[in-house]
Amino acid sequence: MTTVLVVGASGLVGTAAANSFIAAGWDVIAASRRFPELIHGSFNHVSLDLTDRAACQVFASSRSDITHVVYTAVFELPGLVAGWSDPLQIKTNDQMLRNLMEPLVEHNNLEHVTLLQGTKAYGGSVKPMRVPARESQTRVDHPNFYWQQEDYLRDKSASAHFAVTRFRPQLIVGPNHGVVMNLPPVIGAYAALRHEAGESFSYPGGADWVWEAADTRLVGDACLWAADNKVSHGQTYNLTNGEVFLWRDMWPAIAKTLGVVMGPDEPTDMANYMEEKEGVWAEIVRKYDLKRTTLKEIVGESHHYANLCLGYGSTSPPPPTYVSTIKIKQAGFTQTYDSEISFCHWLGDLQSRKIIPTF
């Protein structure tokens, strides 16, 4: 039986990838500092701090059975967006990958590594992206950790004889709360806070910004597809659900799912709003018999991501950030999701697990 090591298994993509591989009958090792509660089925968990080189050495030296790696771990700084170009974040993410891979390749059994990147690779944080952004376009030279990790794996795979596939999903949506970039828990908590204050579920963003999203199940299945499909080896692929959307157009369906009443737009700094509401959230948890979590444990750093994605503070549409998914579809992976249904599905999942209330 082939064995896959999913690194960052408690995060959005790590959880989804582990579930996809388990469903396909693979032997799965899930590595993360905290236990991945949303992985279903049989797997082995290892608590691993990737910044600890010695710990990575001890773990990897004992696992000659690992043939595949799905690497989704990421180190982010508080406040999220400002850290994307920070030298500390870049260096730390580069070193984390090296700490794991250096001892792991010594067994000479590794066949394939999947590396998670993102559409920040196309330089949207420093200048307008080309439309659509394609994997074949010239690398945009700007500070981020993608290039260090990508170049390291390219060199290491050539000498250690394993294949690499890189994925660049757009705005991943899934069930995980307390993570760095997932909007359903933030919007669900925002709706509950507004409802409890007797306020309407107003749209908190700015100017309309057309988005693409990627359901986490799609990303997990893409990782499975790449692992044993040689057409993917050495390739980079964009990933989206296959359509575009506006948050304002999605807002009525979100309100219906959550059972709250919509109101007029009310631009709101989600980061500041959330950080001032811990006491209110504690009362909501008690009143609706929710899982005992703090608001910080619900939103992680994703309230900062919400400000970005919803265009808070913008008075005109930001430059478009469309990516083409023609390449992966022509390679044979054609899975799609309805983004509105996807978002409401994960809100419903949070309700059913009593992370956010149902009204």
Image (spheres, rainbow, N blue to C red):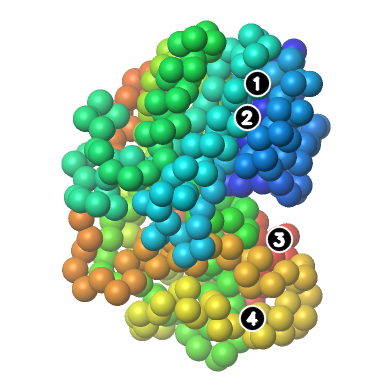
Comparing marks 4 and 3, which lies closer to the viewer? 4
Give the mark, 4 or 3, whose residue is nearer the N terminus: 4
For the N terminus, give its image quadrant: top right
In three-dimensional space, the C-alpha distance between marks 4 and 3, rounded to whole angstroms, equals: 22 Å
In three-dimensional space, the C-alpha distance between marks 1 and 2, rounded to whole angstroms, equals: 6 Å
Residue type beneath disc 1: Leu
Comparing marks 2 and 4, which lies closer to the viewer? 2
Please tell me how crowded label 3 is: few (under 14), some (14-19), or many (20+) other residues with Cα within 10 Å. few
Residue at image coords 71%, 28%: 57
State the residue in front, 45 or 312.
Answer: 45
Tell me the number on the disc at residue 278.
4
In three-dimensional space, the C-alpha distance between marks 3 and 1, rounded to whole angstroms, equals: 39 Å
In three-dimensional space, the C-alpha distance between marks 2 and 4, rounded to whole angstroms, equals: 37 Å
The answer to which quarter of the image holds residue 102 is top right
Residue at image coords 76%, 47%: 35
Please tell me how crowded label 1 is: few (under 14), some (14-19), or many (20+) other residues with Cα within 10 Å. many
Comparing marks 3 and 2, which lies closer to the viewer? 2
The residue wearing badge 1 is 104
Residue type beneath disc 2: Leu
Please tell me how crowded label 2 is: few (under 14), some (14-19), or many (20+) other residues with Cα within 10 Å. many
Give the mark, 3 or 2, whose residue is nearer the N terminus: 2
Residue 60 in view: yes
In three-dimensional space, the C-alpha distance between marks 4 and 1, rounded to whole angstroms, equals: 42 Å
Give the mark, 3 or 1, whose residue is nearer the N terminus: 1
Q: Are marks 1 and 2 in contact (CB under 8 Å)?
A: yes
The residue wearing badge 3 is 352
For the C terminus, give its image quadrant: bottom right
The residue wearing badge 2 is 100
Q: Residue 344's spot in the image, x, y percent?
A: 53, 58
Q: Secondary structure at mark 1?
A: helix
Residue at image coords 42%, 40%: 145
